[in-house]
Image (cartoon, grey):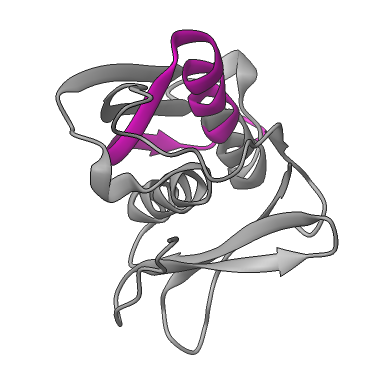
Amino acid sequence: MRKNCKNNNKGFEIIEHLSDTGIKAWAGNTEELFEQCAHGMFSIICNTGQVKAVTKKTVEIKPEQTGGLEDLLILWLERLIYMHEVKKMLFSAFNVFYLKTADKTDQNGAGLRAHAFGERFDSFRHEIFTSIKAPTYHMLSVRKNAGSGLWEANVIFDV
C-alpha cells in the first residue's frame, strides 16, 4: 500500500485528481522539497520500502534547460521517470545537493545536481502500483508559505 510521509518539517501526501494523481509536498528548503517530490512520485509508482538504495544515479540539469523553480521541478521529475522507464530503475532515496534558478541577468550557475539511489526493477520483489507518464503543469506550484516558512509544491501526474 502507498504510504504518505508526514512530519512537521518535511513530507508529502498523495492527492487524487479526476483521472490523474498527484502530490503535495513540503520541506524547509528547495533542495529538500525536490527530494520530497521525487519520493512522493516514486511512492505512487511502487512501494519504496521494498527498494534498496544500492545504485547511485547522478542527475544534472544544465543552465540552458532551466527556467523558474516550476520548470526545474518538472525537468527533475521527468529525468527520474526517464530512468525508471528506460533503465528500469526504481528509486527510494534522493539527494539534491545543488539547486539554483536563473534570473534575467545571469544564467551562470543555474541548474540542478542530484543523486537518486535505488535499484533495477525485480518482478519477484517489486510491485508496480501505477505507471506515471509525466508530471504536468496543471495546478503546478512551488512556493514558500509565508505563515509556516516551509517550501510547498503541488504536482499532478499524467497516469
**Residue drawn 73% across and 42% down?**
159
Task: Give residue 57's quadrant in the image.
Answer: top left
Residue 70 falls within the magenta-colored stretch: no
Task: Give residue 133's quadrant in the image.
Answer: top right
**Residue drawn 52% across and 83% down?**
146
Q: Which residues are magenta?
A: 77-105
Is residue 25 toward the left or the right of residue 99 in the image?
right
**Residue drawn 34% across and 33% down?**
91
Residue 6 location (% of width, % of height):
35, 75
Is residue 76 toward the left or the right of residue 91 in the image?
right
Residue 48 location (% of width, % of height):
33, 46
Q: Nearer the viewer, residue 65 or 85?
A: 85
> Which quadrant of the rendered structure holds the N terminus?
bottom left
View extreme (bottom): residue: 147
Say if residue 104 shows up in the picture: yes
View extreme (top): residue: 86
Say if residue 154 shows up in the picture: no
Is 142 placed above or below 82 here?
below
Residue 17 location (% of width, % of height):
78, 64
**Residue drawn 64% across and 41% down?**
68
Is 56 placed above or below 154 here?
above
Q: Nearer the viewer, residue 135 or 62?
A: 135
Task: Give residue 105's quadrant in the image.
Answer: top right
Residue 90 location (% of width, % of height):
38, 29
View extreme (front): residue: 124
Q: Nearer the viewer, residue 6 or 52?
A: 52
Is 72 placed above or below 38 here?
above
